[in-house]
Image (spheres, rainbow, N blue to C red):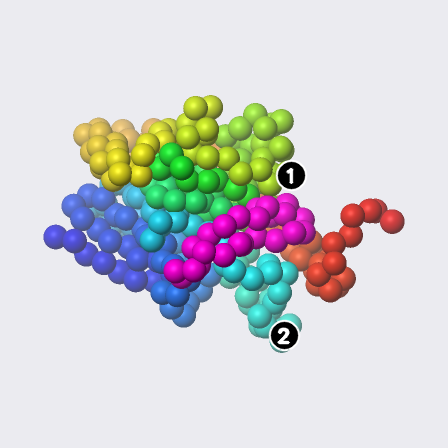
Amino acid sequence: MEQEREYGSIIVSKKDQVATISFLTRSKIGAGKPIPWEISSALNDLREDIETRVIVFTGAEGHFKIPRQKEVYHREVNNPADILTKDWYGGMGLMRCLMTMADIEKPIVAKVNGDAIGFGQSLAFGSDFIIAREDATFLDHHMGGTFMADYDGEVKEGGHDFSIVPGDGGAALVPLHMSPCKAKEYLMLAEPITAAELARLGIINYAVPAAELDAKVDAFVNRLLSKGAYALAWTKRVVNKRLMQHLILTMDAGIAYERVNFLHLEKLGGVEKKTFA
């Protein structure tokens, strides 16, 4: 029997020993805390659920996760106390989300059903396994990347033309998946790359045609479920010890530098400064 629970920006559905966390489209997101905070809350709930053994992340309506359609330096609140509260839930939500993904004993499979951009690619790279449709684009757009995306039924250009520190997990996670030189090229030049190329380079597990994605993920999840529950959980904990140390070392710095970058842009009215003078 399948069960569902909605958190505002995500829906968690459970069937047998598998829980699927689906990201909603912008038009369907309800009131609530930022999505990273809600994901961490959902993961903590699933951590206590002894019936759930594997967690799957996936998106909705043809994309895995894309950024909101507005300039990221625009602030929606003006009261300093409200800004502080928003930044608390935003920044600490990122920390809670990625740290919980690394620490939870249950394997997480990213079922990348479309473009994974910004925080979307951080969620994918923070998962234990990545299986994507071959034409999905991975992009950390913080350093000025633009892209075309379906925003609630209308295809528009997203992204921006200024540089910002990849503080929502990209700067912390990408260097664990790519060589230092390639990670810096990907992050600093905001270079898009397809899932097919990432699979060819051995960076993600599999890239398959869109029509085969469901079957590929289901088969992979069933292989995980065929292993002993305790052995699978403890193996993840051992392998992720180094990941946990790395996130503790880097995530706070990324979030802090990104915030300084935001304040810089706000102070200059959205004009980017390209010299140290």
Q: Please tell me whether mark 2 sits on a helix, a strand or a loop.
A: loop
Q: Residue furthest right?
A: 277
Name which residue lies at 55% across and 67% down.
85
Image location (x, y in percent) of residue 34: 46, 61
Q: Residue furthest front?
A: 155
Image-quadrant location for residue 125: top left
Mark 2 or 1, nearer chain start = 2
Image-quadrant location for residue 79: bottom right
Name which residue lies at 57% across and 52% down.
159
Where 160 sits versus 114, above or below?
Answer: below
Residue numbers of the magenta segment: 141-165
Q: Residue furthest bottom?
A: 79
The 10 Å Cα crowd at callout 2, few under 14, some 14 to 19, many 20 or more, is: few
Image location (x, y in percent) of residue 158: 53, 54
**Residue ID for mark 2:** 78
Q: Which mark is residue 188?
A: 1
